[in-house]
Image (tube, rainbow, N blue to C red):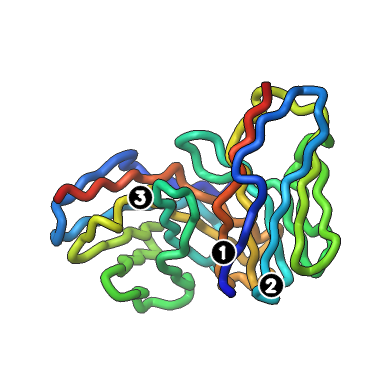
Amino acid sequence: DTEVTQTPKHLVMGMTNKKSLKCEQHMGHRAMYWYKQKAKKPPELMFVYSYEKLSINESVPSRFSPECPNSSLLNLHLHALQPEDSALYLCASSQDLGLLKPQFFGPGTRLTVL
Amino acid sequence: AQTVTQSQPEMSVQEAETVTLSCTYDTSESDYYLFWYKQPPSRQMILVIRQEAYKQQNATENRFSVNFQKAAKSFSLKISDSQLGDAAMYFCAYRYAQGAQKLVFGQGTRLTINP
């Protein structure tokens, strides 16, 4: 299994809603990442988890709350988002944080905030 | 700050021909790694090729090869015998050995393959 899966594929939410994005991998990878990608732009790193511990937070607003309940699962909890948070949210994983270890990306969740 | 520049927002090539995508980067580091990622219209990012900065030999993966010029801080991607399935957005990325070690992406080049 060489896949990173993400659910849901699409999500529409209001600014007062609470929702969660889910990412799963069964490759035994111990590093997992959340990226945000706006249209026609490159991905921007949000969070990095290594061995289920938060390693990097790229000064992301607290309305985004990551969680890594186990080595296969990564969640992104969303609360009180703004319309400008609408984007494609990509999850990725790598064997570990080794520099040459490639990151495998999921297909993304297309988020629209109304 | 490390930056990655892809000066060609869009490129097109005839099927079966060769195309080169350019990438330059700015860094004061001596130890780092470079990657090309492909993002087809389905949006799943796929690693195409990677290069360690300390290696002088250019990386090659089947029809994909790079021209790594460390002194010029240039890392171009050559695609030989272009195929329709090569159509995608291509991102050049840099990862440095110190500090946060995060992946920094260029703005991307959209490649169109003409049949």
Q: CA distance from mark 2 to mark 3?
A: 27 Å
Q: Can you give x and y, in whole percent of width and height, for residue B81 in the image?
A: 18, 65
State how far apart marks 2 and 1 are (Cα).
10 Å
Name the element at disc 3.
strand
Which residue does the image show at 34% across and 74% down from the upper left?
B61
**Chain letter of the residue beneath label 1 in the structure image:** A
> Which chain does the residue under circle 2 lie in?
A
Residue B49: x and y in percent read 41, 68
Mark 2: give few (<14), some (14-19) or many (20+) Cα within 10 Å: some
Q: Residue A41, percent across and down?
A: 49, 38
Q: Report if the CB atoms under discs 2 and 1 are less than 8 Å apart.
A: yes
Q: Secondary structure at mark 1?
A: strand
Query: Residue A30, relative to residue A92: is it above or below?
Result: below
Q: Which residue is mark 2?
A: A29
Q: Which residue is mark 1?
A: A104
Q: Chain of mark 3?
A: B
Query: In the image, which disc is placed on residue B88?
Result: 3
- Dot placed on the residue nearer the N-terminal end, 2 or 1: 2
